[in-house]
Amino acid sequence: MRKIGIYGGTFDPPHLGHNEMLLQAQSQLELDFIVVLPCGEPVHKKTSTDKAKRLDMCRLAFSGEKNVVVSDFEIFNTEKNYTLTTLRYFAEIYADSHLYYIIGSDSLEDFPKWYHPEQISELATIVVAPRANTKFSKAKEYAEKTYGADVVVLKEEPLNISSSELRCLFQFGLDTSQYIDKDVAEYIKKNKLYSEHAEICSKVRSFLDKGRYLHTFYTTMEGLKLAKLLNVDKEKVFFACLLHDVAKNIPQSDWGKYSFENTENLPPPVVHSFLGALVAKQVFGINDEEILNAIKYHTTGRPDMTRLEQIVYVADMIEITRGANLDEVRKKVYADFDEGFLLCLKSSYNCAARRFGAENVHKLTKESIKFYRKLSKEKNEKRKIG
């Protein structure tokens, strides 16, 4: 009996991690060949790129792989792109074969939400690629016990890059050569894909030094993950994170250009936040008060912040380049955002108190901690009652 891999995804864009995942599955499971299947209109998420262009990119990305074919079945299928429908089609085409459906570990987490997961489990073995910092043992056990799924985990983690991170790298004009096939990169450039925010990103870059611009990129990536977690407007999060540090490298001699005077005697680490809100409005044309406030209060916090303000505050603190010493804070943020946010406030206060003395910590930070400690206490009391 032949072994056939079915490798589905949005591939928006396809990257070298996809190639590594494909080759590892091919080798570990001794697959006869693999069908790469870019989806047309995915049921559970949106794509940013036209389906025909994603098909073109897949053909470029996988053209050099042996025993690999790129299928346009879902691209031109007029029905909803349910995995079950796709597997039924290929089970009929390859009636003498065993199917292996290849997915990422994050997709396994969503498996119970799929259309008839128990029937999918009957049609194919589920092959999962592990991803850094992603625990999916419970999801694997649940799929096996609840739906009778046969789940095989690949032994090695593929290149740790996501399509969403790649899209952001293109927007920011940062190097992508280590993550993506050169022909795909050229296609993206030629067709001006992932560039709708490239102009404003370039403008922000002109305000910042290299290190601060990279921090801005990683803050934006963290913010977008939190936006997804908390169901907050991604566009607002993108612009607030992109501009949160735009005034960081502006010298005091230039403050007057933006009608800014430090009349409140703001401490040096705080000044750029309040100045940044003015720069965002005057130079970048941002008039959304929620975005401007997210920039303004991303270092001090304040009582009763919006989710957007909280996201920018947290993303700025825990983005990946901040270091491993914040791993526990990161875990708390993604396990219980409200408690994680309070932990971020406390951590920021402690850091400022050590550097400048507790009496010099901005009053908004002190008020924020008091406000959110009270909320946390009330929340915990309600839990106990419940």
Image (spheres, rainbow, N blue to C red):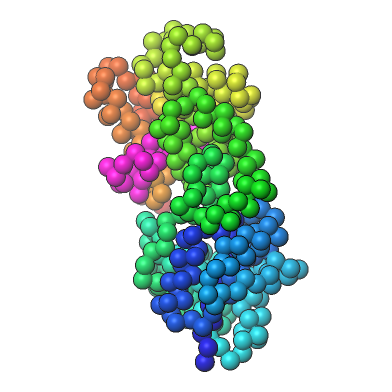
| Residue drawn at x 38%, y 57% as measured from the top left | 132
Q: Quadrant of residue 375?
A: top left
- In the image, residue 203 above or below residue 234: above
- In the image, residue 96 above or below residue 297: below
The rendered magenta stretch, by its main secondary structure, is classed as helix
Q: Which residues are magenta?
A: 306-331
- In the image, residue 358 above or below residue 200: above
Image mark count:
0
| Residue drawn at x 36%, y 45% as measured from the top left | 330
Residue 270, how many percent across, how many down? 40, 21
Q: Nearer the viewer, residue 207 or 117?
A: 207
Residue 240, how many percent across, how many down? 54, 32
Q: Quadrant of residue 340?
A: top left
Q: Is residue 222 magenta?
A: no
Query: Is residue 106 visible to us here?
Result: no
Query: Is residue 54 visible to us here?
Result: yes
Residue 347, how many percent across, how many down? 31, 34
| Residue drawn at x 36%, y 67% as measured from the top left | 156
Residue 21, how many percent across, how many down? 46, 67
Q: Is residue 329 magenta?
A: yes
| Residue drawn at x 52%, y 33% as measured from the top left | 242
Q: Nearer the viewer, residue 274 or 310?
A: 274
- In the image, residue 216 above or below residue 153: above
Q: Given the current orientation, which residue lies at the most extreme right position?
A: 78
